[in-house]
Amino acid sequence: MRHLMSPLDFSVQELDKLMDIAEDIEKNQEKYAHMCDGKILATCFYEPSTRTRLSFESAMLHLGGQVLGFASADSSSAAKGESVSDTIRIISCYADICAMRHPKEGAPMVAASKSTIPVINAGDGGHQHPTQTLTDLMTIRSLKGQLNNMTIGLCGDLKFGRTVHSLINALKRYNGINFVFISPEELKIPDYIRSDILDKNNIPYKEVIKLEDVMPELDILYMTRVQRERFFNEEDYVRLKDFYILTKDKMELAKKDMMVLHPLPRVNEISVEVDEDPRAVYFKQVQYGMYIRMALILTLLELV
Ligand code: CP
């Protein structure tokens, strides 16, 4: 039995296969419509979510399976003090596979260690968000045709943004990747990413504050929101929340085939006028998220 805690749990070849399945699902949905008949997905979300929870549920429903779960800690027995270890033992009796989001780093890993069904990390604190990374990789591969030889700008909250941490970790295994980190001083990437991932693997990167200065060199711009829920005080959040706003004017500085991704939700960091730009692919990215989660469910249940 396999779990998914980090994008590195799959080899590059396995990731390619997963994306191939997801692409086939996109083209031939009816072929997959009953592959999970009789199977149940549990979504155990101790933190708010729109995309991740609902795309997992939609994925299972599109595969012919059924779903159950909870959308907040308050609506589960966590509110009475039940541990994650005990909860997953219970969920293992009710479901065949579980997607779990938790505010504490490592909580899905604890669940996996006690589980008798596959557990998928659907986001743990500021640590990792592997299924968002699968979504991001599939979006880039589908729209750019490859995952090698690119300059990727990551902009915004690089300190608390778990999607950023997971994506850097995943992309370190591809060739010719060059990172540009765009953030205010207070929201720079954590030291462990710099030392354990970038320096250790000799991956070229630079850190800048001004987005306009680097726009012309980017192949991908990955925008992120400032993660209000992880700040210790509201004053800092208010000061930093609108540090970056991507506008039409800034898009004019970019390459004609540059692509803007965003894990969403968006707050103010991308002006709505940018949505009309064909280089803005964050809503298409959401569609890929469902197909890759369908492929993941099938793979972890050993149905493909
Ligand atoms: N991208 C993402 O994780 O969105 P949700 O928080 O809505 O699940």
Image: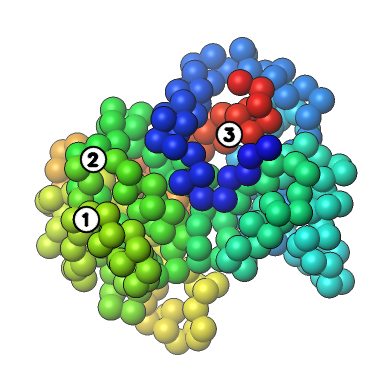
Amino acid at dot 3 = Leu
Q: For the residues carrying marks 2 and 3, which lies nearer the camera in this image?
A: 2
Q: Residues within 10 Å of mark 2 (few under 14, many from 20)?
A: few
Count of marks, rendered view: 3
Who comes first in sequence, dot 1 or dot 2? 2
Q: How is the image coloured?
A: rainbow
Q: Locate residue 144: give its quadrant.
A: top left
The residue under label 2 is which amino acid type? Asn
Which label is found at residue 202?
1
Residue 283, position in %: x, y? 44, 41
In the displayed structure image, the side of residue 232 where residue 195 appears, left or right: left
User: Residue at the location (50% across, 57% down)?
Assistant: 128
Is the residue at mark 1 in contact range of ligand 1, meaning its CB lies under 8 Å from it? Answer: no
Q: Position of residue 44 (x, y in %)?
A: 73, 53
Which element type, helix, strand or loop, lies under badge 1?
A: loop
Q: Residue 20's image quarter? A: top left
Q: Which mark is residue 296?
A: 3
> Distance from label 1 to label 2 (Cα)?
11 Å
In the rendered structure, are the residues bearing label 1 and label 2 in contact, judged by CB atoms less than 8 Å apart?
no
> Label 2: which residue?
175
Q: Amino acid at mark 1?
A: Asn
> Who is closer to the viewer here, 237 or 129?
129
Is residue 278 something one can see in this rendering?
A: no
Of mark 1 and mark 3, the one earlier in the sequence is: 1
Position above or below: 59 against 223:
above
Q: Name which residue lies at 19% across and 68% down.
A: 208
The answer to whether residue 231 is left or right of residue 45 is left
Question: Residues under labels 2 and 3: Cα distance?
Answer: 24 Å
- Residue 243 placement (x, y as % from top left): 31, 72
Cα–Cα gap, marks 1 and 3: 30 Å
Examine the rendered structure and indicate whether residue 274 appears above or below residue 102: above
Q: Residues within 10 Å of mark 3 (few under 14, many from 20)?
A: many
